[in-house]
Image (cartoon, rainbow, N blue to C red):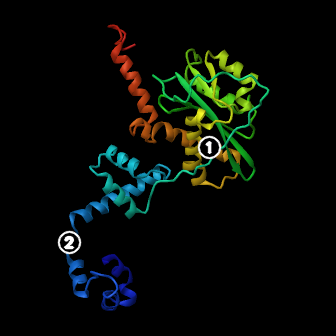
Amino acid sequence: MIRFINEHRDRFGVELICQVLRPAVRGFLTSRGYRAAVKRPPSARRLQDDLLVPEIARLHAENYGVYGRRKMHALMRRQGWVIGRDQTERLMRLAGVRGVRKPKRVFATKSDPALQRPTDLVNRRFTADGPRRLWVCDVTYVATWSGFAYVAFVTDVYSRRIVGWNVAATLKAEILPMQALDMAAWDAGGDLTGLTHHSDHGSNYMSMVYTDRIVELGAVPSTGTVGDSYDNALAEAINNLYKTELIRQRGPWRTVEQVELATLEYVWWWNNQRLHGELDMRTPVEVEHTYYAGLESAHPAPAGQGSR
């Protein structure tokens, strides 16, 4: 009520505002009560709100404007603020921000019934004992003013880190998914022995040039059943988040190159800064660092080799 009077007092006057609204709004201030409230020093809660609301707005904007109450609460705690979840929700309302909502849309790739398909080695169990054990791959698309931009992601199931990606104006296997796979393989040192590569039945993933590349790198190919989106649910969920958090937030898109640059920035944020609920509000990079630190502590280097 104080804020409302402050915003309109110069136009209508305090006396008239209080006189008109007092019968309509239960508990509305009298003009005398308003002047007493204005002279009263701000409360500790008001001072804290004045400090935290701009911080909430800044952090929300820095994370693509997509965080809801849970992730904003976790982020504020990581920043060192002692704050509750309900308080975070209230401050988000004051800051005029809220989490983004995911639409229930599914993009299905086109399969080639004439191709021989690998068996399903995952069976909807999207878990792994460590990094570089199971990768899921999928393709999505972005409409631009100059045509479609196709986007391929390779994601490590253990850490949810996007280890390979590519944006192109074509779905050709040797251009779109192959370059994403090669990026992921390069990051892994070029040897994928013991790794399972899981995808859907898209013709680009089932092409001979692509499946030969998987085997050449030492990985084992795996695919789900035909027409069943749940058999590659994790990869499709990542596509959905990509479309929700970046594409629909920042569009319209003019060119494929614009989408490529934005995807580069988004992948860095996803891996290094985005908090994932499935990872106990940690980032993929933090999860992998914790895993490898645990291996080092379990198998310490021999004396004299630690500083090499």
Question: Residue at point 37% right, 86% down?
Answer: 10
Q: Which of 138 and 61 is in front in this view?
A: 138
* Among the two numbered marks 1 and 2 on one chain, the one whose residue lies closer to the N terminus: 2
Residue extending furthest right?
114
Q: In which quarter of the image is residue 203?
A: top right
Name the side, left or right, on which 265 lies relative to 46: right
**Amino acid type indicated by mark 1:** Leu
- The residue positioned 41% from the left and 57% from the top of the image is 57
Residue 273 figure quarter: top left
Foreground residue, 192 or 197?
A: 197
Which labelled disc corresponds to residue 41?
Answer: 2
Q: Tell whether label 2 touches label 1 (CB within 8 Å).
A: no
Q: In this view, does 142 lie above or below 38?
A: above
| Residue position marked by numbered label 1 in the rendering | 261
Q: Where is residue 171 in the image (x, y as percent from the top left)?
A: 74, 36
Which percent across, then down, holds residue 254? 69, 52
How many dots with numbers?
2
Query: In the image shown, does 208 or 255 lie closer to the viewer?
Result: 208
Residue 260 horizontal/vertical position (percent): 64, 42
Q: Is mark 1 on a helix, strand or loop?
A: helix
Q: Residues within 10 Å of mark 1 (few under 14, many from 20)?
A: few
The amino acid at mark 2 is Pro
Distance (Cα) linking label 1 and label 2: 49 Å
Q: Which part of the image, by quadrant, shows the N terminus?
A: bottom left
**In the image, is 281 to the left or to the right of 210?**
left
Q: Where is residue 42 in the image (x, y as percent from the top left)?
A: 23, 69
Q: Residue at x 21, y 63 (%)?
A: 44
Which of the pair 285/90 is nearer the observer?
90
**Residue at image location 36% in from the left, 57% down from the top:** 89
- Determine which of the numbered discs, if any, sits on residue 84 in the image: none
